[in-house]
Amino acid sequence: MAIPAIEQRELVAGVRFQKIGKLYHFDYSAYPELKQGDYVIVDTRRGRQMGQIMGFTEPDAQRDVRRILRPATPRDMVLRQHWEAQQDEALEICREAADSLRRLSEVKFVAAQYNYDGSAITFLFSAEQKIDATVLQKRLQRRFEARVDMRQIGPRDVAKLLGGFGACGITRCCSTFLTDFSPISIKMAKAQGISLNPSEITGMCGRLRCCLVFEYEQYVEARKKLPRRNKRVGTPHGEGRVLDQLPLMDAVLVDVDDAGRKVVEREDIIPLEEFRKLAEKAQSPCEKHGDGSCDCGMPPGQRQADKVNAEHAPGENALAEKSPAKDAPRRGDARRSRGKPGDGRGRSGRRRGRRRGGRRGGRKTDSGAGESKS
């Protein structure tokens, strides 16, 4: 589908030359019928090449935009397939020529890339130090009868070209979707709490893994919301010191003074000053109890009733001490004494007295009955 004429003056075509590569901007105003997915022929630093339009975007004011020469023809597509099939053979020839030169015996040649029409070929190699391959370049140029370019690349580009699987078990990110390499530092691994063991943070290329940058910003934002290490905070378990941040759980590990290590969520963390005020409030008497609600944890009116009882208790005790009824005998004691206070006998003595009186009364009754019979 062609882009409307109004937008053609404002947009440029994003062209890609490799399957997973950078996008380069080109002016397509000479061919407004071009659409996404079409192949075009353009001029680059490496000569005339064929690329595919991946989309349309706004131009970069700081960069010069070249024009698209023409759309690719079926003949161009056939030529491209032919020369791509010759790339592996060209790479073997380059390696043999490099082995004959002692100074290039340690250089690792990774790939050979032909232009779509075979007019130029580029050899990509990797080495620990910067290499001058001018001698090899001249030999290969006589051999291929084409313009030869030698390009030294880094270990990440090597891993991207070779492909393969990463430590996670899936295809490497660089050879799957990464079009550019972002700078990565050890700080990113520390922010995510990853072990600094080289086998844990380095990729197959020997550099820090590209995936360390994927979630770095999310970890940084999550840690900003959590208290820092060694900071004292209040928790539902008591006051303690923060040992570690757990950004994925939105929580912290706290060494509580009286309860040991506890995992506390961010929403349950209480600022230290507020926590200490709450602790003091819990220990001090409540001043707003009545019939309304209160946050001290006691039922409404309970603390006020206790306070009122405490205020009236001293007066009642004083009245009780002054009252003459304090020394009066109890009701039960008066009933047991039968009007004989001060006899000095205890309860057991009174019981024996009742038994003796009962036996004496029985004898009198028996004698009286005998006299009446007589």
Image: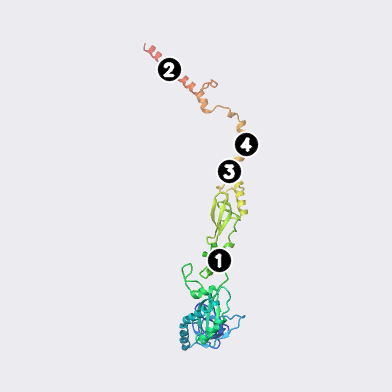
**Residue in the image at 51% along x and 27% along y:** 332
Q: Which residue is mark 4?
A: 315
C-alpha gap between disc 1 and disc 3: 54 Å
C-alpha gap between disc 2 and disc 4: 53 Å
Q: Which residue is mark 1?
A: 218
Q: Give the SS element for disc 4.
A: helix
> Hey, what amino acid is under mark 1?
Gln
> Hey, what amino acid is under mark 4?
Gly
C-alpha gap between disc 4 and disc 1: 68 Å
**Residue in the image at 45% along x and 20% along y:** 355
* First in sequence: mark 2 vs mark 4: 4
C-alpha gap between disc 3 and disc 4: 16 Å
> In this view of the protein, which residue sits in the foreground, 70 or 207?
207
Q: Which residue is mark 2?
A: 359
| Numbered label attached to residue 177 | none
Mark nearer the viewer, 4 or 1: 1
C-alpha gap between disc 2 and disc 1: 103 Å
> Hey, what amino acid is under mark 3?
Ala
Q: Which residue is mark 3?
A: 305
